[in-house]
Structure formats: structure tokens, C-alpha cells
Image (cartoon, rainbow, N blue to C red):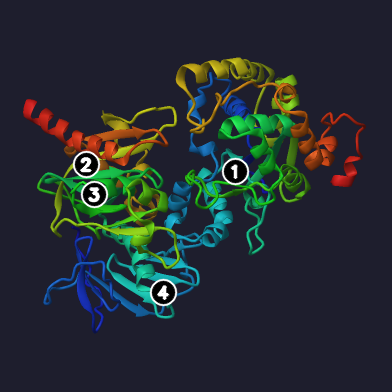
């Protein structure tokens, strides 16, 4: 990490509270002003093809995937250079990864820090299935697929660059095991249970100024019900076409219990049990030594 | 157009027309119209030594460097490299074995952007077709559907003026579009939306999935720009909407309207680009066409584009 580095990476597997946390942080940076859910600009999005084209000049659409991939560290450096002295938040769904030349996609030299937001994968499976308009079984298979990639080549959503996810467990471990960028682990469930405490933790990690009054205002402005109400009235630009539920769907922990079949929950446990236990998720058995998976 | 420097001329080569400029090239460029012999070229393209890096570069990315003298190096590592100097002197790396289609792909995109910014010409990031006797530029960053819409309009009989890079020249109080190659670059899904067979289209870079629709082009003369239509996507919409933009929102953010605006700023066009856009907005109506992300027939959007011109005509007649 470089002193005064520009980028704060807000990292999560999809449908793990990334948008909610970014809205909170933007509220805090703005001094606790009211939140417009559709006011999230490109500056907090994932790297897009148009950003690539504008910042690196050559048209990304005329490159082959390996040429685009090789340039991704440079793209992130260019984003930081555009930001200058300030802080920019960037949403990340990628696992932590390196380009074939060995360079990290998220260069430590431009990284102020990362927040890794994790959510019980059983709730992720339900929410991700609604988001994509697929079945929980398909999503559970995606979460166990080492080759899973968002916006993959040929994907209809190619506005963004390809984002390798890997398995849900591999995603968690890739970020928590890397030593290049200081990373704060935050559980979605803890954000839900105590948003003020969580927000202060994240703000301190990314060196965002705050006081108790601004934190309280932001927490109030970003209560899940308020975001849901805004989506109901205005819609939400990030809601995917084909989605079978509002983007701000429930904002609850443990709702998988009424949705997933026993076999589906068992499959997730079989795929991800060790990491789930390490993160303290209730797997119906005793805990496991986290050091084994660090 | 702004005053061209006199470039060193290649010893041989045919003259062709690139964005309104007479280009003398030692490299065959089959997509460009051939010019009659005898004129003085504005641009030259020859093979020669292109450095790996520019000494004293003031800005660098993995593909592009800007020299202290305003020269621009465009390099696709291991494939092709161009050095662009003084807005007219182009050198193609003598060691490059790139196919003609690859050379054309980058010449008609990043290299053209560098030439136009060096020469102080406004390049809109737009695809452009003729509607009646005026040109309509459909502008937006990549992924907004510029080429798909140009393809749809082409299939409805509208001549294609240019795709992606749209130079605008101001003459006698009018904004004129300088035609480019009438080649519309399409992703396979866009080709499918237009009912075109992916396999039946030409390739750009060999083995690349993007295809080239060789559309019927307008003649090579400048075309009066009748409207700019900015394209946007909003997932909340069920149906596309078109409306007129006025005031500062019509020309901001500049990066959504100008081809490689940051490159232009780095080449000294910070004030010039803004001034040109203000001028453009005083001459030409600017619209926003917002569509849902999916499920819209391109011909429906094409109808909306044509309707903008009709409405504009009515406004003029009424006003």
C-alpha cells in the first residue's frame, strides 16, 4: 500500500451487500447527506470497457481477451492517476488474481486498502439466483465452479471487463490470504446487526473521516427499508434484466432456511463447509480451527 | 480543416481518403476510397522504425505514449505499432507483420483519434448515417449500441457516414461531418439482432469475434450534421425514450461525446474541445435516446432516430 493511495476496494462475491456498503460509505464521504440509490456513478463501479477505452485509448473491443487482461493492472493504475490525491471507492467482484505476466490486477501501489464483505453462502445462493433469474441449483453450481466468471467473453453483459470469481470459498481465501493490500474482513451479518460499528470499522480502515453524528445519519439514511422504498418508487439502475426480485430484496440474514431444500443446503455445506466454519457460520456442528485455512 | 503540416512523402503508394484527408500510403488500405492522382497529400503512411518507447514521454499506458513534442505512439504489443507526428506523418513499424485488416482496425480507431486531436479537429465518439440530406450522429461510449443502430439504419437504406470516430468540421456557421470508412463493427449478438449471419460477414482482426458490415457509404464529401443523438441505457425502462437536451447537460460529460477526450486534453485540446462542443450545441440539436438494456428491436430505435430529424424539421418549420 502506498501512502495517500487512491483506491479503496470494496470486495465481495456478488449479492453479499457490496452496494449497500458503498452507499453507506458514499453517504459518509458526503457528510451524511441523503442517499440516492441511483446516484452511484461509474466512479464506484467495476472496471468497464468504456473506461478501458477512454483511459488506455485503444478500443478494448478490438483486443483479444489475453491482451485486455494483460492491461488490467495498468487500467487500475490509470483510474488511480485520474483520482489524484483523493479517495475513490471501487466495487470488486473479482477474486484476487494476477495477470499471466505475474502482476496483480489490483496493484498495491495504488491501493489504500480493501474491505472484504462476506455473507453466508446459503443466503448468497438464494439472492444470486433471484438476481440472475436462475434456479438455486444453477447458482450453487456456479459457486462451486473454479472457472466461474462474471461478464465472460461472449456474455451478453459485456459492458464490464471479465471478472473471474472462482468458487465462493476460493474467492474468500484469495483476498484474505493475499498480503499485498491491507484487507478488512467484514461479515454481512455483522453489518446488518450493528451497522454503526461496522461502518466506523470500515471508515477507519480506509481513512474516511467520520464522527458519531455523521455515522448515525448515514445509518439512518441507508436503512434497508429506505433503500427498498426508493427502489420501489424510482427503480434501480443496477438491477439486472431478467431478475426475479427487487435488487434490495430482503436484507436479512438466514432467510435461506425457508427457501433452500435440505439437499441444496447440504451441497453448499459440502462445497464450502471449511471456509464457512472458519468464518463462524452455523454449519450445525462444532467450529474448526481457522488457522488451517489461513 | 486546420492547416496541415507538410509531411515527408513516401516514394510510392496510392492516395486514398481517410476522414477527409488525402493519405498517401505505402500500405494497401482496401477499405478506403482511392483518390485520383495528382493532389498533395495531407497525411503520409510509410513503414519505418518505430521506437519501443518514446524518450521523454509525458504520458504512457500499455498501448499509447505521448511524447513531449505531441507525438503519439500506438502499440499493440507484438502485433502492430504506429508513430503519429505533427498530425500527418504516420510511421508503421517496419517489423510488424500484421495483416491489412489489423492495420486498418487500429488505423481507423486509436490512430485516427490521435491524428484528429493533433490537428485540432473535433472527433465525436459517434456512428453516423444520412437521414434525408443531413447526417445524424449517434454518440456514446462503447457498449451503448452506436454500431448496432448504424447497422440497423443502414439496413433500412440509410447511407453510413462513419462508424465510431466522427470528425466534425465547422464551416460557414454549419457543423459538417467528414465521412470515414463505411465499415460497421459488430459483435456477434449485434449481428444476430440485425438478422445478419455472423459467418457471412467479414472479419476485422483475424480470428476476432467482431465482424465488419461493409455498409453502403455516403459519397466522400462533408455532410451537414442535422442532429446528435446521445445513447444511454437504463435498466429501469421498459421502452425506449427520446428527448431533447438543452443547456450544459447537452454536452457533458465531455468524455461521453468526444472520442478519447483525455487523449485530446493531453494533446493540448482541453479548451478547444470544450469550445467546439459549445459551438456544436448552438448549431445542432442534441437529443438523448435511452433504452432498456435488452429486448428492444433495433429497428424501433432506428425509427426513433429518424423521428428526431422529422421533429427537428417541424420545429424549424414552426419556428
Camera-near label (2 vs 1) is 2
Q: In the image, residue B98 lies at what x, y percent?
A: 41, 74
At 36% from the left and 44% from the top, the residue drawn is B145
Chain letter behind tag 1 = A
Left or right: B237 in relation to A12: left
Q: CA distance from mark 1 to mark 4?
A: 38 Å
Q: CA distance from mark 2 to mark 1?
A: 35 Å
- To which residue does mark 2 refer? B280
Camera-near label (1 vs 4) is 4
Q: Residues within 10 Å of mark 3 (few under 14, many from 20)?
A: some
Camera-near label (4 vs 3) is 3
Q: Quadrant of the C terminus of chain B?
A: top left
Closer-to-camera residue (B110/A136): A136
- To which residue does mark 3 refer? B155
Please report contact status of discs 1 and 4: CB closer than 8 Å, yes or no: no
- To which residue does mark 4 refer? B98
Circle 2: element type = helix
User: In the rendered image of this protein, does residue A17 appear above or below residue B58?
Assistant: above
Chain letter behind tag 4 = B
Q: Are marks 3 and 2 on the same chain?
A: yes
Q: Are marks 4 and 3 on the same chain?
A: yes
Please report contact status of discs 4 and 2: CB closer than 8 Å, yes or no: no
Q: Tag on residue A6?
A: 1
Circle 1: element type = loop
Q: Is residue A11 visible?
A: no
Amino acid at each position: 500500500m502506498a501512502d495517500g493511495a487512491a483506491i479503496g476496494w470494496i470486495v465481495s462475491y456478488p449479492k453479499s451487500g457490496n452496494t449497500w456498503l458503498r452507499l453507506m460509505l458514499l453517504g459518509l464521504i458526503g457528510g451524511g447527506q441523503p442517499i440516492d440509490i441511483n446516484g452511484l456513478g461509474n466512479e464506484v463501479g467495476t472496471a468497464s470497457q468504456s473506461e478501458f477505452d477512454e483511459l488506455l485509448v485503444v478500443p478494448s473491443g478490438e483486443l483479444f481477451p489475453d491482451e485486455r487482461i494483460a492491461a488490467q493492472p495498468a487500467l487500475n493504475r490509470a483510474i488511480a492517476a485520474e483520482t489524484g490525491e483523493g479517495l475513490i471507492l471501487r466495487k470488486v467482484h473479482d477474486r484476487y488474481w494476477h495477470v499471466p505476466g505475474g502482476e496483480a490486477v489490483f496493484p498495491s501501489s495504488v491501493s489504500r486498502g480493501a474491505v472484504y464483505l462476506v455473507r453466508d453462502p446459503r443466503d448468497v445462493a438464494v439472492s444470486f439466483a433471484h438476481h440472475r433469474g436462475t434456479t438455486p441449483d444453477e447458482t450453487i453450481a456456479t459457486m462451486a465452479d473454479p472457472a466461474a466468471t462474471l461478464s465472460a467473453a461472449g456474455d451478453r453483459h459485456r459492458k464490464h471487463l471479465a471478472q473471474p470469481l472462482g468458487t465462493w470459498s476460493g474467492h474468500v481465501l484469495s483476498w484474505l490470504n493475499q498480503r499485498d493490500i491491507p484487507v478488512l474482513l467484514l461479515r454481512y451479518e455483522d453489518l446488518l446487526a450493528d451497522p454503526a460499528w461496522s461502518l466506523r470499522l470500515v471508515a477507519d480502515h480506509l481513512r474516511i473521516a467520520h464522527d458519531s453524528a455523521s455515522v448515525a445519519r448515514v445509518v439512518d439514511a441507508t436503512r434497508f427499508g429506505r433503500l427498498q422504498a426508493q427502489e420501489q418508487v424510482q427503480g434501480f439502475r443496477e438491477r439486472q434484466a431478467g431478475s426475479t426480485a427487487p435488487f434490495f430484496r430482503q436484507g436479512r440474514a438466514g432467510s435461506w432456511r425457508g427457501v433452500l431444500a435440505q439437499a441444496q443446503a447440504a451441497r453448499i455445506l459440502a462445497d464450502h463447509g471449511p471456509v464457512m466454519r472458519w468464518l463462524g457460520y452455523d454449519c450445525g456442528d462444532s467450529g474448526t480451527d481457522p488457522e488451517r485455512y489461513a | 480543416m486546420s492547416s496541415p503540416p507538410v509531411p515527408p512523402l513516401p516514394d510510392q503508394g496510392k492516395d486514398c481518403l481517410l476522414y477527409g484527408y488525402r493519405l498517401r500510403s505505402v500500405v494497401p488500405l482496401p477499405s478506403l476510397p482511392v483518390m485520383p492522382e495528382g493532389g498533395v497529400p495531407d497525411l503520409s503512411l510509410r513503414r519505418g522504425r518505430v521506437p519501443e518507447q518514446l524518450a521523454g514521454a509525458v504520458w504512457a499506458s500499455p498501448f499509447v505514449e505521448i511524447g513531449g513534442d505531441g507525438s503519439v505512439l500506438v502499440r499493440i504489443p507484438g502485433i502492430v505499432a504506429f508513430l503519429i507526428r505533427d498530425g500527418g506523418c504516420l510511421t508503421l513499424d517496419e517489423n510488424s507483420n500484421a495483416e491489412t485488416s489489423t492495420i486498418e482496425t487500429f488505423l481507423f480507431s486509436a490512430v485516427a483519434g490521435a491524428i484528429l486531436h493533433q490537428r485540432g479537429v473535433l472527433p465525436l465518439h459517434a456512428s453516423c448515417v444520412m437521414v434525408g440530406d443531413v447526417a445524424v450522429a449517434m454518440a456514446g461510449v462503447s457498449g451503448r449500441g452506436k454500431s448496432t443502430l448504424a447497422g440497423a439504419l443502414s439496413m433500412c437504406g440509410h447511407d453510413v457516414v462513419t462508424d465510431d470516430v466522427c470528425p466534425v468540421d465547422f464551416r460557414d456557421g454549419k457543423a459538417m461531418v467528414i465521412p470515414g470508412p463505411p465499415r460497421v463493427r459488430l459483435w456477434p449478438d449485434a449481428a444476430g439482432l440485425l438478422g445478419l449471419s455472423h459467418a457471412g460477414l467479414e472479419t476485422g482482426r483475424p480470428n476476432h469475434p467482431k465482424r465488419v458490415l461493409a455498409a453502403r457509404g455516403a459519397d466522400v464529401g462533408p455532410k451537414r450534421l442535422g442532429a446528435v443523438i446521445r445513447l444511454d441505457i437504463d435498466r429501469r425502462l421498459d421502452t425506449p425514450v427520446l428527448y431533447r437536451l438543452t443547456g450544459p447537460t447537452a454536452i457533458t460529460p465531455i468524455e461521453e461525446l468526444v472520442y478519447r477526450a483525455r487523449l485530446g486534453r493531453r494533446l493540448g485540446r482541453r479548451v478547444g474541445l470544450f469550445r467546439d462542443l459549445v459551438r456544436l450545441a448552438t448549431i445542432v440539436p442534441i437529443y438523448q435516446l435511452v433504452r432498456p438494456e435488452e429486448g428492444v428491436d433495433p429497428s424501433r430505435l432506428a425509427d426513433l432516430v429518424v423521428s428526431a430529424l422529422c421533429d427537428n424539421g417541424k420545429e424549424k418549420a414552426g419556428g
